[in-house]
Image (tube, coloured by chain):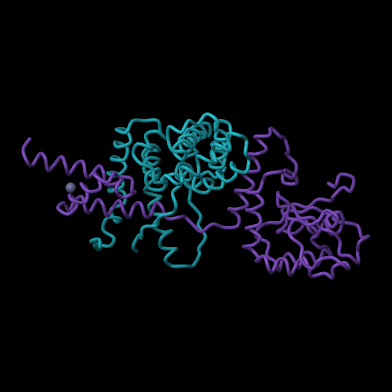
Amino acid sequence: MNQSDDVFSIHRRVWELIPWVVNGRASGEELRMVEEHLADCSDCREEHEFQTRLRAAMSAEPRPDTKADGVAAAASLQRLWQRVDGEEEPALPVVRRRASSSFARGLLLAVLIEAVGMVALSAALWTRDSPPPGAPLYRTLSAPAENASRATIRAVLQPTLTLGELQALLERAQLQIVAGPSDAGVYSLAPQPALAVASAQPALAQLRAHPGVRFAEPIDAARQPP
Amino acid sequence: MRAEAVTPPQPGTKAADNDRELALLRLVAQGDRQAFETLYADYYRRLGRFLARLTQRQELIEEAVNDTFWVVWQKSGEFRGDSLVSTWIMGIAYRCTLKTLRRAGGAATEPLVEEYEDTGAPEVHAQQELRDWVGKGLRHLPLEQRTTLELAYYMGHSCEEIGEIMDCSVGTVKARMFHARVKLRNLLPALGGMTGRAKA
Ligand SMILES: [Zn+2]
């Protein structure tokens, strides 16, 4: 093997190694060989530049994550658990509470926090109606069952619904949030205190007609969880 | 338009990542759902975007992601640690995707126009345009070559790991990479001459 053969074989080896140098997976020895050769070979330098740009373009994220991505991930996980559990829940799969869907809950909470800000949410929704005497002004998201027992409607909101839209909708439907979101992102809604005897039906119709509500259903008092 | 190196975290390519994933997988093998959900969250987005290079149909991507994690849930107890956890998961993902694409037929890999949200930030926008343009070039490559490139450049796997994932020899990985590179030099010549010489 003469010297030009040797140089050519190094060139070929280096050319082959370039992608693994670019993605950081070449060994230290390989990296040294490539760097040494790049100093002398403009073809390999150019190829190294090309592959570096190609990798940069390929690893750029297509778009920033949206709230919809978080909801899609949570919904997708939910479907997987249903499959794991061999459950058939075609009608309203998200209503069911699940012991360990902390990820789903986390995503939905993240969605809400991102949408309106936790402070704004707690201040504006939880305390905007004068609370019953003795009730705390601030409630955590896991509201006490006693409070939730007033609920007449369960609803899941679209992640795109803004705080302003939600407030307007609740105002119009004369509802307030009494619990939620649950692990599955379900809110429990109740008539505003002065209207406690009112039928849930008109409010239900308003919720269902709103594009920012994924679904809403009346809570059957007999089936209500304790 | 300069392509700055954007390096998102690549699961499983570092020893610490693998230790963490291995610990999670051991818990999953004992039926720990929370550990499973953590693993799912780690992979969901990247796996989805990886698969988006193989098919443009969102419902097939979703199906393949959940098929993959269904197998992860079922087989976690059989993982012996012979490879990195990420290599094991990506191998499952590759097999599940091939199965899904076969079932869906030829239309599954037909190119569709990707939709992007215009975020208004110019540097983000340029980066997305570049990605889009490169993505169009990639679609001219056969599935195996595209997958090889994607595993190397998006997921950050080594040549040997890609061989394990795609169940082929290192020589085959190298050959696929070679052909993909030659083709892309012809498809995307402008990528080579965009900014002249690299700065030292
Ligand atoms: Zn050279």
User: What is the tally of numbered marks visible in this picture?
Assistant: 0
Instruction: Specify whether B184 is left or right of B19.
Output: left
Q: Residue furthest top?
A: B78
Q: Is B105 in front, or is A141?
A: A141
Where's residue B151, x and y in %?
Answer: 40, 43
Q: Which residue lies furthest to the left in this view?
A: A2
What chain is colored cyan? B
Residue at screen point 82% across, 63% down: A173
Q: In which quarter of the image is residue B66?
A: top right
Quadrant occupied by the N terminus of chain B: bottom left
Instruction: Specify whether B78 is left or right of B135.
Output: right
Quadrant occupied by the C terminus of chain B: bottom left
Where's residue A134, x and y in %?
Answer: 87, 67
Where's residue A10, x and y in %?
Answer: 16, 42
Q: Quadrant of residue A16?
A: top left
Residue at screen point 21% across, 51% down: A35
Residue at screen point 82% across, 56% down: A205
What chain is colored purple? A
Instruction: Specify whether A31 is left or right of A174.
Output: left
Where's residue A195, x and y in %?
Answer: 91, 64
